[in-house]
Amino acid sequence: MTQLQQFNYTIRLADDALILGQRLSEWCGHGPILEEDIALANIALDYIGQATNLYKHAAQLDTQKRDEDALALTRMEQEYNNILMLELPNGDYAATIMRQYYYTSFYLLFLDKLKSSNDAFFSGFAEKSIKELRYHVQHASDWVKRMGDGTEESHKRIQEAANQLWPYVGEMFGMDALENELANAGYAVDRALLVDEWKKQCTALFDEATLAMPTEAWHHKGGREGRHTEHMGFLLAEMQFMQRAYPGAKW
């Protein structure tokens, strides 16, 4: 694995964590109940913490000598490589919960495989992060079941969220030349091999929650190449404001 490959792979993982953490942080002060306000704020902090560790590692590999703050907060929109689902607006609470379940159930499987990476940093990062992800999956799963098997209104909303987000889940399992090469060398995870187990877990939860699994076969893609939805620019404008208004400020 070359230094550039390691940098690019690290940035992908960091961008996923940062953008999801930013989106979840928007619920702070707006949660449906106090316990959920606190829960999502803490989950958001978990992802920001993961992103910080990843950006610090990427900074050590960066030929442009940018530090973790510059990597996180000063790049242009097309330089971010997060998957598209994570940048979508939160929507109602059902939409946020379904995004959480779709992604965290995948991410837990991903980290479990990344533990076996030949790269010491990636394996160590996965080992540490798995402890947080187990709680994230449990939290999202409990809410999917509660909404799906709850009132007529809650069932309707969580089913609509499942259907609307489904066209974005395929990108989680996408493999390109970089990840194929690193996976074949034992450094990265072959995401495509996670599909069957993820769908099996999804189906079991949906059955318990009395939800219908979506069947749409077409999926969005482009985030890994820096082609984002119209929502990404607005997210970055808010997230990067302080750093761009006061470059290099310390507090």
Image (spheres, grey):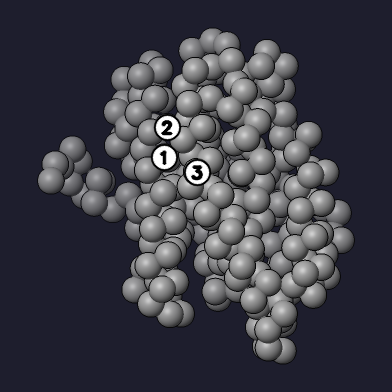
Seen as rendered, the residue at the extreme top is 2
- Residue 213 in view, yes or no: yes
Q: Residues within 10 Å of mark 2 (few under 14, many from 20)?
A: many
Is residue 229 rendered to the left or right of residue 241? right
Q: Give how far across and how far down residue 141 sits, in percent.
A: 64, 63
Is residue 71 rendered to the left or right of residue 176? left
- As drawn, 8 above or below 173: above
Query: How far apart in space, not on screen, are marks 1 and 3 (Cα)?
Result: 16 Å
Seen as rendered, the residue at the extreme bottom is 152
Query: How far apart in space, not on screen, are marks 2 and 3 (Cα)?
Result: 17 Å
Tag 2: amino acid: Leu
Tag 3: amino acid: Lys
According to the picture, the residue beneath numbered tag 1 turns out to be 51
SS type, badge 2: helix
- Which residue is nearer to you in this view: 57 or 75? 57
Q: Give how far across and how far down residue 200 sits, in percent.
A: 82, 51
Q: Residues within 10 Å of mark 1 (few under 14, many from 20)?
A: many
Q: Which mark is residue 131?
A: 3
Q: Give how far across and how far down residue 74 sits, in percent.
A: 34, 39
- Which residue is nearer to you in this view: 167 or 186? 186
- Going from N to C along the chain, the mark reached first, 2 or 3, is 2
SS type, badge 1: helix
